[in-house]
Image (spheres, coloured by chain):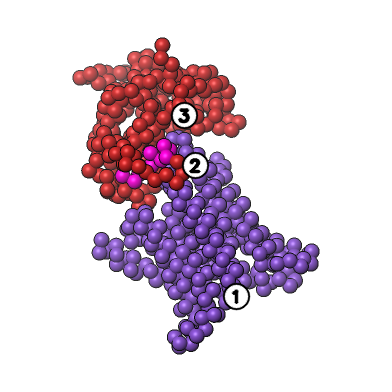
Chain colours: A purple, B red
Amino acid sequence: MIQEFLASSEIWRDALAAAAIAGGMCGFLGVYVVLRRTVFVSAALTQLSTLGLVVALFAEEGLGAEIERASVQLAVATVFSIVGALILGTASHRRIPAEARVGVAYVLAGALVVIGSSRLVHAAHDLGGMVFGNAVAVTLTDVAVVAVIAAVCVAVHAAFVKEILFASFDGETAAAMGLRPTRWNAVLYFTLGLAIPASARILGALPVFAFLTVPASIALLSGIGLRATFLAATIIGVLAGAGGYVASWFWQLPTGPTMVVASAAFALPALLLRAIR
Amino acid sequence: MIPPLVSLDDVTIGHGRRKLIGGISLGIGANEFLAIVGPNGGGKTTLLSTLLGILPPLAGGRSQPAALRVGYVPQRDHVDALWPLTTGEVVLMGRYPRLRPWQPPRAEDHEAVATALARVGILDLLDRRFGTLSGGQRQRTLIARALSAEPDLLALDEPTNGMDPAAELASLDVLRSLHSAGDLAVVMISHRIEAVVNYATRIALVDHERGLWRVGSVDEMLDDDALAALYGRRVVVREENGRRYLHPQAAGGDA
């Protein structure tokens, strides 16, 4: 069975690489998502990127456009995700709590996706790929896109780690000491908005939400420091993305949910580590 | 005459279009200890934010003759203990505004962290997890973070809120020793005048519900009219062993 798997490397090679990169990227960003107590922002952004896809599909159907559809769809989904991320991450209102804004964005985008998809004539398959992931259809171009996005996220976070950390941990003090937390929150949410659509295209919406939540939660559960938490969450994301894909291949399971379960399986070693410490 | 570090001239404070209090004129001298006192929701934090330049005044002007380095201490429960940061990592954030993007903390930044922790008496907690500290230790950590910025002005928002009496006195003693050690202006918010009356050099009374705005020396603010305006009843001030104690009287009572 293993020989058969290895012999088929041309089929799974690109998907495995893309799942590992997307898993690691979401695992890293998830540390901020969990520590800022904004896990449902990632769910809302996934819905918004799907809404962007629906809009792109409508435009293509309406215009009968003869253009490279996948890149346009991803571009429109990314614009929706980034704009949504910047609004949800930086706007504040004295009368409406942040979680209510996230909830409104989630249900409204979800309802519009359902209404929009019911009116699409030919493009339901494309939408299904975006919502549930389509690891089998991953191409080398998809790997390159997600790798470039991951590199952008790494570069931004390496450059501005101090500022993003201070604004996330204690924005009130950061503002009083002249650091402009709104600007650095926008930078953080820009990377989230950038990462989610490309990851959802490869992994599906459920695993993206899971990878933005589960690896970071497990890393925090182990009781390690902040730097180690970022490293552990990234590694768990990589291993769960790749391992979940391989497991789904061997046991003929749905790929996305298998990745989610694979990421949760790291809770056991984390608990053991905490007990030892 | 030395100009104030920062001053407000006939300022109206508020949020957006909502005015809270008008006619505020206030200057912060280089080595003074100002306590901003008033009830919860009375406009104290809005006043401090306006003074620090975080919120723009709705009317009037704010002036700051020279660059002002601010060390800020938020309310302790506004800082999330979930983050797996050590005490040293939290204090190091006070140095971040001095560093450019890409620039990692330098040896002098780590030295400033150690110095600040030593000044508040918790250098031994450098590597302890912030979330495992007691309330008083967390407060000192946040004061150390503000001090690591080597500030001209130390601003504190309800620093003793929710503390037991021993921890409250210990925190206020730390502030007094920091203030008396050198050129450091302190502006501290409190909703309890009795907590600051033995530490501050000036007191500002703020309550937008009653349109209350007064500022003056501690003696001026302890007169019957000012205290009655703050408490809504008569308050007796007694002095023992060099400390002042406030005794609010029963509503409608004379003694």
Prevailing secondary structure of the magenta residues: helix
Q: In which quadrant will I find the N terminus of chain A?
A: bottom left
Residue at image mark 2: A181
Residue B10 horizontal side relative to residue B159, left or right: right
Query: Which chain does the residue under circle 1 lie in?
Result: A
Which dot, 3 or 1, sits closer to the camera? Answer: 1
- N-term-proximal mark, 2 vs 1: 1
Which dot, 2 or 1, sits closer to the camera? Answer: 1
Whether labels 3 and 1 belong to a single chain: the reply is: no
Residue at image mark 3: B52
Q: Secondary structure at mark 3?
A: helix
Q: Amino acid at mark 2?
A: Pro
Residue A215 percent coordinates (x, y): 42, 63
Residue contact at pointers 2 and 1, CB within 8 angstroms: no
Q: Is residue B185 a member of the stretch shown in magenta?
A: no
In the image, which residues are magenta? Answer: B88-99
Q: As rendered, which of B16 and A22 lies closer to the eye?
A: A22
Residue B199 percent coordinates (x, y): 30, 23
